[in-house]
Each structure stands twice: as C-alpha cells, then as structure tokens.
Image (cartoon, rainbow, N blue to C red):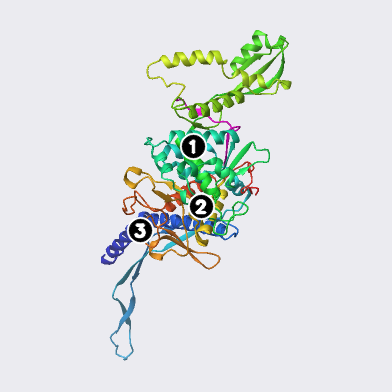
Amino acid sequence: MTLRVTIRTLSILAAAFGLSACQYSPGMADRSMAFNDAVANSNNQLLFRNIVRASERMPTYYSRLQGDTASAGMSPTLGAAIPFTKGFTFEGDKGATGVLTGTKSISSLGALSGTIGLSTPETNTLSLQTMDDQKYQAGMMKALDFTQLKGYFDEGYSRDLLMLMFIARVRLDTDLVNKIDAAVASTCSDTSTDSTCEYIRSDPYGANFAGGDWREHWSLVKCAANGGAYTNTAGTSVEFANDPAQEILPPGSSADRTKIPHHQMCFEMLLQDLFVLGLDIAPGGNLSSEVVDAHVPAKVANDPNFRLEMVKQGTKIVNLPDGKSAVLCRSKPDKVAFTLAFDRKQNTALAGLASKLTDDLEATRQSGADDDNSGACARNDKPRPEARKAHAAKADRAPGAQSDDTKPIRLVSKDIAFTERSFEGMIYYLGEIVRADESGVDPASIVRVHGRNSTVTGVGYTESMFYASSALDLADAALSIKADSGKEMRLPKLCPLSIRLAPLKADGGGCSVEYPDNESIAVLSLLNQVWGLQKEYTGPPAQPVILANPQ
C-alpha cells in the first residue's frame, strides 16, 4: 500500500513539472532586449563600416541579422529503485530417517530509493542574410523620392541637414542666379532679424575672400565666376554641386586652397539663400493633365453617350479650335514640388524674382507641341489669366485670405532643378566627408548645418554635419570600427572633448545635447531609416549612383 502511494505521488510531481516546462522560458524579456541591442549594434557598425569603405574607395557590402530563434525549456526526470532481494531459507524438520522433508524460502523487500531531476536546455539560432540580389541592388541605386523628403521636413528634422543628405546637385537658370543674389542681399539687410540672415551677415566664409564685406563674399555669381560652380558651355545654366571632396577644386587653385570658393561652400550658400526665400515642399495635387487620346473626331466627341461615358471615367473632352477634332485629357496627381514663399512687395529685388518664377511657371503649364495636340491638355489645366486675376481678387477679399504677394510659388525645372541622391549616393557622400576629415579638413569644405537657436548660441554657431576620424580619442567615440586599411576609425559623441569641429557659442558657452558639436549620430539614424525604406525595389534604377561633374 505504501509503495503504491509513493509511486502515485512521484507521478503527480513529474506531471506538474512537465506541464510547467511547457510555459516556462527563462530570461525571455532579457533575450528580447539582447536581440534588439544586437540588431542596433550590427546595423550601426555595418553602416559606419561601409561609409569608411567608401572613404577608402573600397567596395561596399551589406548583410543583415535577419532573426534570432531562441528556445528554452525544462526536461524533468523521475526515477525509482525498488530492489527485491532473496532473504532467508528455512529448513523443515528431519524425519526418523534423518532426511530433510521440506524447505521454504522468504524474500525480503530492500530499501526504496527515488531520483528527481530537472534540466533546462537553451539554444539560439541566428539567421544572417547577404543583401546582394537584384532587387536589393536596384533599391539601393534608386533615387530617393521627394515625398520621403517632405515627410522628414514635416517631422521636424533639421532642414539643411536633410537637404545636404538628399540633394546631390542643384541646377539654376543663369538669370535666376543673379536675381537670387539681389533678393537675398536686399532681404538680409542690417535690420533683418531672421536667424538665417543673421548667420549670412556673420560672414562665415569671409576668410576665403580678400577684402570686402558679407555682400561681396556671399555671392552665387562670384562662386560661379571663380570656379565654385559649373556653368554650361552655352552660359544658360549654373550647377552647384554638394560635394565636399578635396579634389573637386577649380583649375589653378593653390595647394592650400586659400581664397578659393570650394564647391561645398558655394552649395551651402545656395541652400541658405533658398531658406531665406522660404524654401519648402508642397504636396502634390491634380495640377496637370495627361493626354489619353490626341485625335478624337468631333462627331465622336460630341456624341452625348460618349461624353457621358468620359465623365464617368473622369476624362475631360477638349475641343480644338479647328472644330474637326478633340483631345481627351485625364487629370493626374503631380509629385510633391519645391516652393518658395516670400513677400514680393517687400522690395524690387523680390518682385523681380517672383516675376521670373511665376512667368516661367505659367509658360511651363501652357507649353506643349501643337503638332500632335498634346499641348491642349496643359493649356486647359488652369483658367485664363483674366479669370485667375478675378478669382485672386475675390479670394483676397475673403477674411483671413492669403494674398498672392505671399503665396508659395511652385518651382519648375526650367528655373531650378534638384537632383536627389540614392542610398548608395548617401554612403559615397559621407565617405567623401570622412576622406576629407582624414586628410585635414579645409574649413571651406566642412559640411555644416546652421545652429538651432541663434538667440542662445550666437549667430555664427554651426554644427558639423558628420565627422569620423582615426585621430579622435577613444573616450570621445560613440562608435568604433576597424577599417579595411587597418585604421581604427571612430565616430564622435555629441560633445567630444579631444576635438572641436565648429564654434559652439558666441559667448564661449559649452556643448550640450541641445547644442551639440556635430550631428554624426543623427545622420547615422537618418541613414538607417533610409536604408530600411530602400532595401527592396522592383523597378530599374532611375539614374547612376554617382555622376561625375565635368571640370
């Protein structure tokens, strides 16, 4: 009876242990956080390593920690030893003959013993992925969409940091270069309290010019004339390159590059000019039309049933002046577009700039080749000038209405064309910055972002956008990797003590999280997000990763 109870008790205990093992996983929360840390560290190291590879002109390679499958459990064991041993032998009585008449053997129960065991096996399986297939490569080479840039604008990222990362080049109409110079000079007069104007008036690049004040130094025209930008052979356009490479210098430059407008410096001048003039990104809308059919006989176009069907499909019928045919037009949503917004009545320079921009915008909307009737849709997109003026006058009379004098002006590629980067283009760009850092940074080519609060930090305050060097002390490093060349390359913390990359405060104040010395960590964070957006793409690359600018 005692044996049966004991075995039953042990069986119940074993079952309880077994059931509990199904739900118990030791360190589950710790494993989740450890995996998150592993992904973060591996991604940061991978991106930084490829930036350094690009700086050394080495090929870039990408891999990804895809998953970590962890399993843990309990394996209970139960054992019992119940020995039966032979005990004593009793002999029977002898008879008269003295012969043994019988025997009886009795076995005795030995000591009962039991064992209980519990083991907790733990295993981890890592899944790694090499990202070198066609879809991934096409995604890395695809030019970034300005819709993404607008999203980052709206999230509150530093706008000059975003433009420096996303935009590779800006091409301007030559006449527009002169008008922007005049508009900024008049807007940023000594009485202007705009923070960007105050920064421009601080003459941050004055050391690169001989004599004169900020009006003579801060000039896109002089940048182009002195080799800091590319003017096409016809003299109709000027291209400003966002390129910090030390080798990108005008012909005849001195060895130490003094008194020469570097391309990076000129690009950042243009960028701050556009911010003074209210650069922003406007959402797309049904602002233009595409041709569905350019040759529809008038008899068909005027048929009531046909017209009703076109209305159902959202297609507009535009009758041509000859009365013999019509064009079918369907509205299409435009992509987001860059805009400028400034008060064109403030001075004559701004009025002249606005006149050119609006005239070119109108010409673009009304353009189209009449030989195939494709221009009919474009001309039909907007009401005639007289109708627009009447509509604007009515809108201006409405309470709280925005006057046409301050409404954003949509930029067209004839005036300003922005060339966006791909993800690989961003890696190459940051690699150029690192290569310049290692060779000794020319102050004119430091990639800067404007300080966030000039009231506190002073008008001359800037932050280095990105910095990495083997010369940085290990104690100041937020991230460190061993380069293919054998160097120990380090990415700085927000406030490194061993090096100062930019003037901190005009009053000599210190560095802080709010007013850091550099934005290297923020750039790495942005790059990681862009990497996630571009990892796969099903279409072909829109443009080469790197375009060489002619000297």
Identified by mark 2, the residue type is Ser
Residue lying at the far bottom of the rendered structure: 98
- Numbered badge on residue 42: none
Q: Nearer the viewer, mark 3 or mark 2?
A: 2
N-term-proximal mark, 3 vs 2: 3
- Numbered badge on residue 274: 1
Which residue, given by chain and number where applicable, does mark 2 sit on? 445
Viewed as shown, does residue 499 lie left or right of 46? left
Q: CA distance from mark 2 to mark 1?
A: 19 Å
Residue 152 occupies quadrant:
top left
Q: Position of residue 265 (x, y in %)?
A: 51, 48
Residue 84 in the image: above or below residue 491 = below
Please give the name of the residue rendered at 57% of the width and 50% of the height, measured from the top-left corner.
Answer: 424
Instruction: Residue 139: tell me if it is visible.
Output: yes
Q: Position of residue 342 (x, y in %)?
A: 45, 29
Which residue, given by chain and number where applicable, does mark 3 sit on? 27
Q: Residues within 10 Å of mark 1 (few under 14, many from 20)?
A: some
Identified by mark 3, the residue type is Gly
Q: Are marks 3 and 2 in contact (CB under 8 Å)?
A: no
Q: Secondary structure at mark 1?
A: helix
Give 206 or 131, whichever is nearer the viewer. Answer: 206
Span colored in magenta: 406-419
Q: Is residue 484 magenta?
A: no
Give 360 or 151, whichever is nearer the viewer. Answer: 360
Q: Secondary structure at mark 2?
A: helix
Identified by mark 1, the residue type is Leu
Q: Nearer the viewer, mark 3 or mark 1?
A: 1
Residue 496 occupies quadrant:
bottom left
Viewed as shown, does residue 538 lie left or right of 489? right
Instruction: Residue 24: tell me if it is visible.
Output: no
